[in-house]
Amino acid sequence: MMPFITSQFLRRRKGDRPAVVPKGARYLGLIGQFCELPDDVVFTAEYSIRSAQTAVYTLLGLSREATPVSQGKFDPRVLYEAFRALHDIDA
């Protein structure tokens, strides 16, 4: 029923997906989960939001950045909670 549901999890290489604003484009911005955003994880609502922000800011010539990607892997609280979950430790 949904043949492309797993396509987001297939292996890929840099350049497999188009840039949010393709080189030379003046009026075209690609949004959603099938455009390229560096250092981000597909299959999240935030990915789609960041691609839309990037497209709008770029095409309108605004000097703004899309919402930054959460770097929870560097947050000691997140690491501690992950450790507790992996070792089945209750508070």
Image: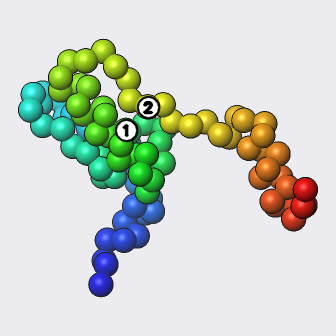
Q: Closest to the observer: 53 or 29? A: 53
Q: Tell me if label 1 and label 2 are in contact, CB under 8 Å.
A: yes
Note whether 46 is above or below 67 in the view shown. Answer: below
Taking the spot 23% from the left edge, 25% from the top edge, the residue there is 58
Q: Closest to the observer: 50 or 36? A: 50
Q: Position of residue 13 (x, y in %)?
A: 40, 48
Which label is found at residue 50?
1
Q: Where is residue 84 in the image (x, y as percent from the top left)?
A: 85, 55
- Between the C-alphas of marks 1 and 2, the distance is 6 Å
Secondary element at tag 1: helix
Which label is found at residue 70?
none
Note whether 4 is above or below 53 in the view shown. Answer: below
- The amino acid type of the residue labelled 2 equals Thr
Taking the spot 79% from the left edge, 50% from the top edge, the residue there is 81
- The amino acid type of the residue labelled 1 equals Arg
- On screen, residue 90 versus residue 28, left or right, reads right
In the rendered image, the residue lying farthest to the bottom is 1
Q: In which quarter of the image is the C terminus?
A: bottom right
Q: Closest to the observer: 15 or 54? A: 54
Q: Quadrant of the N terminus?
A: bottom left
Residue that numbered label 2 is attached to: 67
Taking the spot 32% from the left edge, 40% from the top edge, the residue there is 51
